Image (cartoon, grey):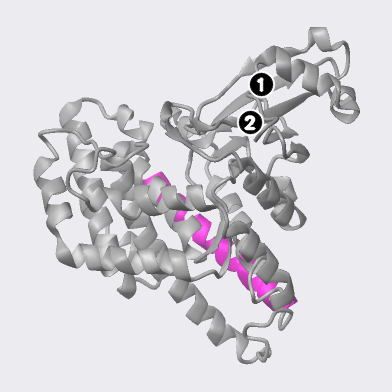
Amino acid sequence: MKDYRTLAPEDLRAYLAAQPSLAEKLGGSPSDWAIREVSDGNLNNVYLVSGSFGGVCCKQSLPHVRVDPSWRMPLDRAAFEARYLRCITPYVGHQIPKLLHYDDVLFLIVMESLTGYQVLRGALNEGIAQPGFSARIGEYLGHTAFHTSWLARRFEDVAPEMAAFSHNHALIRITVDLILTDPYRKGCSRNHWLAPELDDLVEALQSDKALHVAVGHLQERFLSAPEALLHGDLHTGSIMLRGDDVRVIDGEFALYGPVGFDAGLYIGNLLLHGLACPEHADWMRDEIIEFWRAYKTIYSEQRRAYLNHGDVQSLLDENTLPRELTRSFHGFMKDIAGFAGVEMIRRTIGYAQISDYDRCVDRPARADAMRDALQVGRSLILEARQIETVEGLLAML
C-alpha cells in the first residue's frame, strides 16, 4: 500500500494518458476527455471517462467504505474482482464488461464502459425493463456454475482458484455478517427498520430459535460447500441492461461457495420487488420461472457436452446422467430458497436496504410490503429443505 493513492479526476486523466493502449482507446487529447464520477455503491470510487474514439469505466478500491470512512476496508477487493472477470470471461465474456487493465498498486480496474445501459433495479422501479431479462441471468449462472466447478475441471485446476478466492476475507466477512447473521441479532447497530410498524415481527425473528437453527444451516452451506465460483453479490443492483443485452457487474465479492447462493440472492430481489410493487408481482413470478428454465437448460447442456471432464461424478454416462441432474437441481433449489429468504430479510431490516420500497404509495403500503417480505423470507428459510422445484418456491408467496 506504500505507493497507493486515491485518484482524483485529474490524477486519473494523467494515469490513463500514460497507458498507451487506454489512451488510444479513448482517442483525442487527454485534456479533452470528459470524466464523470458515477460512484453509487458502498465500496469504491467509479468514474466514466470518454474521449473522441470511445470510453472506459475506472473503478478504484478505497481504504474504507465509501459511505462510512470509519469502516476500514482492505484494498485488495479490486484484485478479486479482476480475477473473477478473468476466470469467467471464457464462458460468459459477452455478459460482463471487458477487463481492459488492472493496476495492482493503485487497486484500479479499467474496463469497458457500459454507457447507455441502466441498472436493473432502477429499470424495474421505473417499469421500463424489457421482460425476459432473467433468462439471460439464468444462462449466465448456468455457464459459470458448471464451468468453474469440480464437475467440469480437474482438481489441479480448481484448487488454486479456490485457494486464491478464499483470501477474500473482508468481503466474505461482510456477507457472513450482513446477510447471514446481523439481522437475527438483537441490538445490532447495523440493523434498522420501519418502526413501530415492524417492531413485533423483528422481535419475533430475533427470538425465533427454530429460524436461527435454519439460518445456521445456511451459514454452514455458504462457508463449507465450495461447489463453484460465485459472483457473491448478485442482485438487481449489480446487473445492467440495454434492451435485451444484459451485463453482470461488481464481482468483488467473488468466492467459491454453494451454487444456489447467487441464484438465491437474485430471486430474493425479484420477490422483494414484486412485494414492493404489487403491479409487477406477476411479472416477477414469470421472470423467476424464465430464470430457472434458462438455468436448467444451459447447465444440462454443458454437463452433457463436458461429461466426465472433471473429478466429481466422473463415472457417469448418458444413462445415469439424467437422474443426477434431477438430484442436482433439487439440491440447488433447496439452497436457492434458503438464501432467497435471508436476502429478503436482510434487505428489509439489515444494512444496505433496497430502493424498491420507495415505490410504495404510502407508509402503510410500505409497512405491508415489508411485513410480507419478512414473513415470506422466514417461510423460505424454514421450509427450504422441502423446496425442490421453482413451483414449490413460488407456492411460498
Above or below residue 217? Residue 189 is: above
Residue 75 in percent (x, y) is at: 59, 38
User: How many numbered discs, if any?
Assistant: 2
Residue 317 in percent (x, y) is at: 68, 90
Q: Is residue 68 left or right of residue 85?
A: left
Residue 288 in percent (x, y) is at: 45, 54
State the extent of the magenta-drawn residues as a range. 282-306
Say which amino acid is labelled 2. Gln
Q: Is residue 314 left or right of residue 356?
A: right
**Which quadrant is home to the C terminus?**
bottom left
Above or below residue 162? Residue 204 is: above
Do residues under tags 2 and 1 come within 8 Å of each other at their CB atoms? yes
Residue 232 in sight: no
User: Which one is nearer the viewer's eye here, 374 or 82?
Assistant: 82
Above or below residue 145? Residue 54 is: above
Q: Which residue is mark 1?
A: 7
Magenta-drawn stretch contains 243: no
Mark 2 falls on what kind of element?
A: strand
